[in-house]
Structure formats: C-alpha cells, structure tokens
C-alpha cells in the first residue's frame, strides 16, 4: 500500500497485544457476516441484531471509491461518470501477516457468491463486481439492496469491515429510474440508522462542506455525531487561499470521532493507471509540505484513516460483543422453538403413521382437557371450554326457565272458554280436569324450544373448542387440518341427533302423563281453599251495589265447588216449566201463538256470562297450572343438561379419537393427509439454516470472547471509555498504534 504501508507502525509483530486484538476481534465480525450471508432474505428475522460495520456514504464524485481503493492499495472498483456502486458492497479487509504469506506481495480477493475461487488479478475483481451487479439490476442504472460480499486478504491492510453504498444523487440521468434518489436514500438509511454502524461520511473539499449530503444524512440518524467519522477528500484541489483546517479540527461541524483529510488520485491519474503507491507518496508529500496542515498529522492521510477505522471498529466491537452474544443466544432459542414446531421431514410410511397417530391423539386429548378445564393454555381473561358450557346450563338455560311465568300467555277469558269447552253441552258443576290438563300441556310444550336452543349453544361451543385444539404439528399439514375439522364437525353433528331425540322425548313424556299425585303438586282441595280466600279478599276490597252483591252471591253459589252447587233453584224451576209447557201445547194446540224465529249462531262464538262467571274456577286453574309447571320445569332443568352431557359432550370426549382412527388412520391416506405445503417446506428449510447459522455464531463468540476478556484485563483495555473517548486531539502521536493505552491520543 505504498511507502507508508510497509512502515513498522503498520505491520506489527504477531506477539504484540494490539496485533492480537486487531487480528482477532474484527475478524470475529467478519466471520459472523460470512455465517449469516448465505441466509439472504432470511436476515430480516434477526431483527434487533446488527453486526458492527463501517457504512461508507457520499455523493457521486465525492471520491468515495478512491478512498476505498486507497485503503486496499489496489484498483478494483468499477469506475464511470454515473452511479458506479449500484449494490451494497460488503468489503472485508483482512490483514495477513508476512509469516502467513510466503510472498509479501501476494494478495487476493474472495467473493461470497464464489467461495471456492480466489482472485489474484484485481482487474478481474472489478469485472466480477460489474457482472454480478448487472446480473441483479441489468445494464441500466437501477440499484438493488442485495449485497455483494468481497473479502480482500493482504499484509498491507488493517482489519476493517466496510459497506460501500451507492453514491447520493439528486437528479435521474439517462435511463436511471425516476425514483433513484429516494431508493438510494432509503438504502443508505437502512444501514446508517443502526446503532451498531459507524458512519464514514465522505465529502469533497472543493464543494461547500456545510451542505455536504453525506454529513446531512449522517446527522439525521446520529445528531450528536458520536458514531460518525468525517472524511474530506480532494484537499489538493481546493481554491487557492482556502483550506480545510477548521473542518479537520471539528470547528465547523463537530464530530466526536473527528475528521480525516485525504488527497485522491485525479481522473487523469486513474486514466493513466497511476499506481496507488505513487498517489500515497504524493499525499504524504502534500501534507508534509503544506504548512496549513502541519501539526495535524493524526488527521491527514490514508494511513491515518486506516488506523483510525481499525481502532474505532475494534473498540466498537469489544463494546457490543457481550450484548451481541446475548441477542444471538435469545434468537437461537426462539428459532430452535420455531424449528421444533415444524418438526422433522417425514420420509417413510412408518414415520407418517406414527406422526398421524400422534397428532390425532394430541388433538383428542386437547379437546377433552379443554372441556374438563385442564388445558395448559387456560386463559384468565374470559370463560373458556367447559366453563362456558356450565354457564350455558346454569346462567342461561336454568335462569331463563325460572323467569318464565307459566300463566303469562293465559288470560282469564282463555281459561273461562277452556272450562266451557270442557263441559260440552252440560253446565259445569265442578271444575273439570280437562281444561287444566289441556292448558298445562300447552305450557309444558313451551319448554321444548329453549331446551333445543340450549343443545345448539353447547354444540356451537364444542365446535369452538375443537378449533382451538389445533396442535403445533397440524400447522404443517393443511389437508389434515381440514379433514380433522370436517370429521369433528360431522361427529358432533351426529351426536346432536340422539340428544335432540332425548330432549324431545323428555318433553313428550311430561306431556303424556300429568301426574296429579306428585307429592309436590298443590292438589285440588288446597287450590280451592286458596282460590276462595283470594276471591273473598278481592270482594272485601271492592264495594258493591245490592243488585251486584245478589248476582255475585247467586253466581258463587252456582259455580263454587262443593255440595251446595248441586242444588240451585234455577235448575228445578227450569224443569217444572218445561213440563207445564208441553202439556199446554198438547191440550190447547189450536190456540198456539206465532212461531218464534231464532237467530243463526255466529261463526265465532264466545260465552256471554258476566265478568264474575267462573271466577273461582279460573283462579284454581291458574294455581294448578303454576304448581304442576314448576314440577316439570325443575325436571327439565335437571334432565336436559344431563341429556346434553351424556349424548353430546361426554360421548365426544369418549369417542372422538376412535372416530378419527376409523375415518383417517388409513395407510392409503397417510401421504395425502401429511403432505406439507410448499411454503411450510421452504420455511422449515430456511429456519433450519437460520438455526444452524445462529449456532455457528454463538460457538464462534464462545471461542473468542474468553480470549478477548482475558486480554482486556491483562492489557488494561477495560480502562478505555466506550465511544465517548473517540475525540480529536491535535497533539496525538501518529506512532502510538502499538500501544493500546494511547488509542485516545492517536485519535
């Protein structure tokens, strides 16, 4: 890398502590990057884990490519007037000591997409970068965020990991996409916004540095300048009478990591293939001869930039290593759990059969556990499973029946008509049983609908439970999941039918036999006494006229249950009158009066008795209906839940697995039921690769962290501040690289 690259300050003995750190800590990150590189787009699952690196940003023609080539000491980047970098280039510089390489001039490059091939010709590296770029984005000027990974091994470099990003542009040129500015900006921001990224902001000295695109972008994500290094290029072509001293001293735009000024090769030098070693020699002479930059040797030149980047990146990596290992370990645990959920790929018929039986068994056990309240996934936020079924029985079904008034839809007029209809052509001497039985059956029949609704509610809950019992393994097999759901639904639907028949039979049984001898039934005598007491209370509380009291007395004498109702004066007088009328008709037929014509009875006929007709009988009938309905209601409240539990819920628990085995556990169905979707296969493969990469990463850190920790204590490196120590110091000694304790002076 030119004259300065071979000085004793650049090439340290392998036994020196700072050499060990520089050659071990940064390569750890390089190795981690190599480990994760094959994952490609899967990298987004490592949210929160970003490996330390230096992101290089700058506008077009800022000299960014020249800086990178100078750090390597070779021409290897594509050149042109338009965007040269169209994909992020991950550039890993790895120092190889002379003892490792037989020929000190031997250098090579390795691409991540060509891991088995070494490029000794750096012009071939340029052609490969260009070809790989065009493969992804074509020959136009589009950009892509898909990375190109290049490792350059050389004894003339320091360990640094850089990300060369596309140059910032303002206006699309030629066939560049119209949104090229936004796309490049978004790509740059995705790298520099990460707290683990060091930002290398390249700005040309022959432009207004206060308006530098690179510094402005860096300020958006790093407003305090704690992780931004400024690089000022083209110092040799500034207008006469101007210089960049104040910028290098951080007096214009302060940066905690400071600035480095460099001199680039001009375009004529590049066109004439002027060696970088000559350019570096010219740069050294420029800073030595230009009196303005005297005393700023630690802030001038490519060698100082290499040292500074190496030291900053070393310390930065050391600071994040403990957290990085913790994050990688936690991600490994999560990914291993995810991989376990996908399970192993099934090859043989025996494996498929065992897997299917295991899934069916787990599903059935989960169903029973959910019903019995033994599920491991029990929630504390709401009722679930069997608790919801119990709620349906007690708080919905039972409570709803208890709130029903059995006589709410029976008016006094309805009961009066029922009594009339039950007596036929005769006058009622006693309250007949027929109206009571007819009316109580009618009320009992009302219990059928809520009972069947209760059954439907429980069925719906079982369907919900079955859908909540999906095992982890079932996610792999969409066909099996669909068939399981179908078989379960049919099975539960079939179980509803016997439960429905049983509930219907229970209601029919209650309607078929009115057990008036039931010990809890109120009975006729008690009902009459209660009715008469109620009627008397009503009459005492209501004043009556003489005629009304007489009518009431006559009515009550005629209609009240008991012996007195058999001896009414109206009955005997009607009989005598009939006999006299017949004799007179026979004796004196010639003197018969004109025929009396009756009106035709109306099609809709209602009784014409007074309001108080059958008052006692109505009250008695209501009392009997209420008493017997309560008996039946309690029976139904008890027996309907039992029927539902027996025929539906418990039957499902006992026989679901057997039904699955009968319907699904067949060898000819194994392949179809356990066929994985393509995306599941892809996700398992990707997750396995991620898991393997994370294991490798954790093992890599395990191998190095202990050594680094030991070295830290022995070399007093722990005394260094974190990032805050990286401040500029104009009195530094440029030869202090060999002493880790003087890093803050070097910077």
Image (spheres, rainbow, N blue to C red):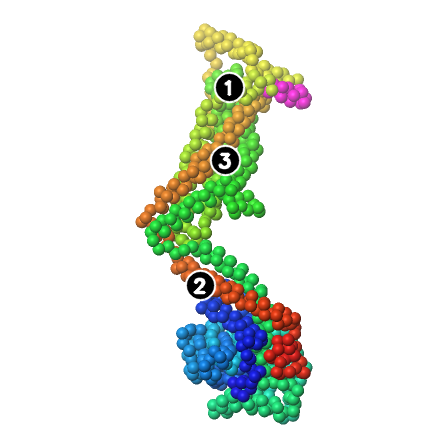
Chain-order first, disc 2 or disc 3: 3
Against 368, residue 723 (above or below) is: below
Do the numbered discs 2 and 3 sit on residues whose CB atoms are within 8 Å? Answer: no
> Which residue is drawn at the image coordinates 39% and 56% (left, top)?
345
Was residue 543 drawn as part of the magenta stretch in this picture? yes
3D distance between C-alphas at marks 3 and 1: 27 Å
The residue closer to the viewer here, 442 or 25, is 25
Chain-order first, disc 1 or disc 2: 1
Q: Position of residue 280 (x, y in %)?
A: 54, 88
Against 656, residue 268 (above or below) is: below
The residue closer to the viewer here, 223 or 320, is 320
3D distance between C-alphas at marks 1 and 2: 79 Å
Residue 229 visible in the displayed image: yes
The residue closer to the viewer here, 201 or 698, is 698
Residue that sits furthest to the left in the current view: 668
The range drawn in magenta is: 531-545
The main secondary structure of the magenta stretch is: helix
Labelled disc at residue 450: 3
> Which residue is drawn at the image coordinates 51% and 84% (left, top)?
73
How busy is the neighbourhood of tag 3: few (under 14 within 10 Å), some, or many (20 plus)? some
Against 80, residue 322 (above or below) is: above
- SS under mark 1: loop
Chain-order first, disc 3 or disc 1: 3
Labelled disc at residue 689: 2
3D distance between C-alphas at marks 2 and 3: 57 Å
Quadrant for the C terminus, please.
Answer: bottom right
């Amino acid at each position: 890398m030119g004259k300065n690259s071979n000085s004793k300050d650049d090439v340290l003995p392998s036994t020196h502590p700072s050499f060990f750190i520089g050659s071990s800590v940064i390569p750890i990150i390089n190795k981690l990057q190599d480990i994760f590189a094959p994952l490609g787009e899967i990298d987004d699952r490592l949210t929160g884990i970003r490996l330390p690196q230096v992101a290089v940003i700058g506008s077009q023609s800022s000299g960014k490519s020249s800086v990178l080539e100078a750090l390597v000491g070779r021409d290897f980047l594509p050149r042109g007037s338009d965007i040269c970098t169209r994909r992020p280039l991950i550039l890993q510089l790895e120092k190889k000591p002379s003892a490792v390489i037989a020929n000190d001039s031997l250098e090579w490059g390795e691409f991540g997409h060509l891991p088995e091939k070494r490029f000794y010709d750096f012009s071939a590296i340029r052609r490969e970068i260009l070809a790989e770029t065009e493969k992804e984005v074509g020959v136009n000027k589009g950009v892509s965020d898909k990375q190109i990974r290049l490792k350059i091994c050389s004894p003339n470099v320091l360990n640094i990991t850089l990300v060369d990003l596309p140059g910032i542009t303002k206006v699309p040129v030629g066939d560049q996409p119209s949104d090229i500015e936004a796309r490049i900006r978004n790509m740059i921001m995705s790298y520099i916004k990460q707290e683990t990224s060091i930002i290398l902001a390249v700005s040309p000295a022959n432009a207004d540095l206060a308006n530098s695109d690179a510094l402005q972008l860096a300020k958006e994500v790093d407003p305090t300048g704690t992780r931004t290094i400024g690089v000022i290029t083209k110092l040799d072509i500034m207008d006469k009478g101007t210089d960049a001293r104040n910028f290098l001293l951080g007096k214009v735009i302060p940066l905690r990591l400071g600035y480095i000024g460099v001199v680039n090769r001009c375009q004529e030098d590049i066109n004439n293939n002027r060696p970088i070693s000559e350019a570096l020699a010219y740069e050294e002479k420029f800073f030595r001869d230009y009196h303005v930059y005297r005393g700023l040797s630690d802030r001038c030149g490519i060698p100082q930039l290499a040292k500074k980047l190496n030291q900053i990146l070393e310390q930065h990596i050391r600071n994040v290593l403990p957290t990085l290992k913790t994050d990688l370990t936690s991600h490994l645990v999560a990914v291993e759990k995810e991989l376990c959920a996908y399970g192993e790929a099934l090859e043989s018929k025996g494996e498929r059969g065992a897997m299917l039986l295991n899934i069916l068994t787990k599903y059935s056990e989960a169903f029973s556990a959910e019903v019995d309240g033994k599920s491991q996934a029990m929630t504390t936020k709401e009722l679930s499973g069997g608790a919801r079924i119990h709620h349906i029985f007690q708080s919905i079904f039972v409570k709803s029946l208890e709130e029903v008034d059995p006589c709410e839809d029976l008016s006094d007029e309805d009961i009066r008509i029922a009594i009339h209809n039950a007596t036929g052509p005769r006058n009622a001497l006693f309250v007949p049983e027929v109206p009571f039985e007819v009316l109580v059956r009618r009320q009992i029949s009302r219990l059928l609908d809520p009972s069947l609704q209760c059954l439907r509610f429980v069925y719906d809950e079982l369907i919900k439970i079955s859908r909540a019992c999906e095992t982890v393994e079932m996610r792999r097999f969409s066909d099996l999941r669909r068939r399981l759901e179908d078989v379960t639904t049919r099975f539960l639907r079939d179980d509803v039918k016997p439960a429905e028949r049983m509930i219907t039979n229970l209601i029919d049984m209650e309607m078929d036999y009115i057990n008036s001898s039931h010990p809890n039934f109120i009975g006729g005598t008690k009902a009459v006494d209660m009715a008469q007491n109620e009627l008397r209370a009503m009459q005492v509380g209501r004043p009556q006229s003489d005629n009304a009291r007489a009518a009431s007395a006559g009515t009550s004498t005629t209609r009240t249950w008991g012996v007195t109702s058999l001896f009414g004066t109206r009955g005997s007088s009607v009989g005598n009158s009939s006999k006299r009328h017949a004799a007179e008709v026979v004796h004196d037929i010639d003197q018969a009066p004109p025929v009396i014509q009756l009106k035709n009875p109306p099609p809709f006929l209602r009784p014409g008795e007074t309001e108080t007709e059958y008052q006692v009988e109505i009250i008695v009938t209501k009392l009997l209906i209420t008493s017997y309905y309560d008996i039946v209601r309690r029976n139904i409240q008890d027996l309907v839940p039992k029927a539902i539990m027996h025929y539906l819920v418990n039957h499902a628990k006992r026989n679901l697995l057997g039904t699955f085995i009968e319907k699904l556990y067949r060898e000819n169905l194994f392949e179809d039921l356990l066929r994985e979707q393509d995306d599941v296969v892809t996700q398992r493969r990707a997750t396995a690769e991620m898991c393997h990469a994370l294991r490798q990463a954790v093992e890599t850190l395990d191998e190095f962290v202990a050594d680094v920790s030991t070295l830290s204590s022995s070399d007093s490196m722990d005394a260094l501040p974190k990032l805050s120590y990286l401040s500029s110091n104009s009195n530094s000694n440029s030869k202090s690289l060999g002493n880790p304790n003087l890093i803050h002076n070097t910077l």
